[in-house]
Amino acid sequence: MSEPVEDMNAERQSGSRLAEAIRDVKNAVADRDDVVVDIREAQRTRLELLADDLKPVFADVDEDDERFDFAISAGAQPRLWIDSVAHVTMGRDRRTYRFLRDTRLGRVVLSESSDIKKVADQVTRYVAERVIERRRMLEGEVTPLDPRLYVSQDDGREKKGSSVLRGLGIILLGGLVGVAVILMLSWPQIADMLGRSF
């Protein structure tokens, strides 16, 4: 008769262990969710600071010009929308502002900097170019402005050259590591072959 009582106690203990494990997992998930929410809020706050710097620029745009949005979107990746194809978002380090524009050929980085003033200046220049482009089209000129004007000249050249060199360095380093691994793995066979030749 004592065996069923012991089995019931063992079941209760395993049930309580499971309940404790479930409670621990729920707490861990809640903590992780809190961190994700905090990160999103920090990104949104930084974008709001940029939007505050750009308020005078936004106010100077004609109300008739419906191409501009000037709104911060919510979601997994908050964005400050300038128009339907250009927005500012935070980089992976969550401190770098990335001013991006979607084109037919893909996304183009117009400016990338942790300096809010530099990004605000680039957004202001972009808005000015778009306003002039609209005026020219309304006057009958159908040729759009050169899209290269939107790209910050110093950002594009510097990053392109350094990324090419970085890529070549990674390829070279990978090749050297591969050769070293092959030599290490085949060293007994190489030593045996060298011993036979002498």
Image: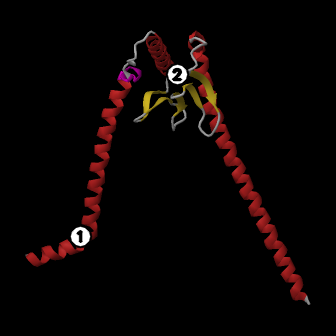
Badge nearest the viewer, 1 or 2: 2
Judge whether 9 appears above or below 21 on screen. Answer: below
Marks 1 and 2 in Cβ contact (< 8 Å): no
**Kind of residue sitting beneath label 1:** Trp
Could you tell me the amino acid type at mark 2?
Ile
Judging by the rendered image, the residue that carries numbered circle 1 is 187
Q: Is residue 166 left or right of residue 74?
A: left
Task: Give the camera-side residue of 198 and 22.
Answer: 22
Above/below status of 153 relative to 92: above
Q: Which residue is drawn at the image coordinates 47% and 17% (left, top)?
A: 130
| Residue 121 located left or right of residue 49 | left
Position of the C terminus, as image quadrant, is bottom left
Q: Residue furthest front?
A: 140
- The residue that appears at 58% across and 15% down in the rendered structure is 58
Main SS class of the magenta portion in the image: helix
> Could you say where residue 148 lies in the image, as x and y percent from the top left?
36, 23
Query: Who's the residue at 77% across and 67% down the image?
Result: 18
- Gap between marks 1 and 2 measured at Cα: 56 Å
Q: Is residue 148 magenta?
A: yes
> Viewer-proximal residue, 145 or 58?
145
Label 2 packing within 10 angstroms: few (<14), some (14-19), many (20+): some
Is residue 100 part of the magenta span, yes or no?
no
Q: How is the image coloured?
A: secondary structure
Q: Earlier in the sequence, mark 1 or mark 2?
A: 2
- Identify the residue under disc 2: 116
The residue segment tinted magenta is 147-153
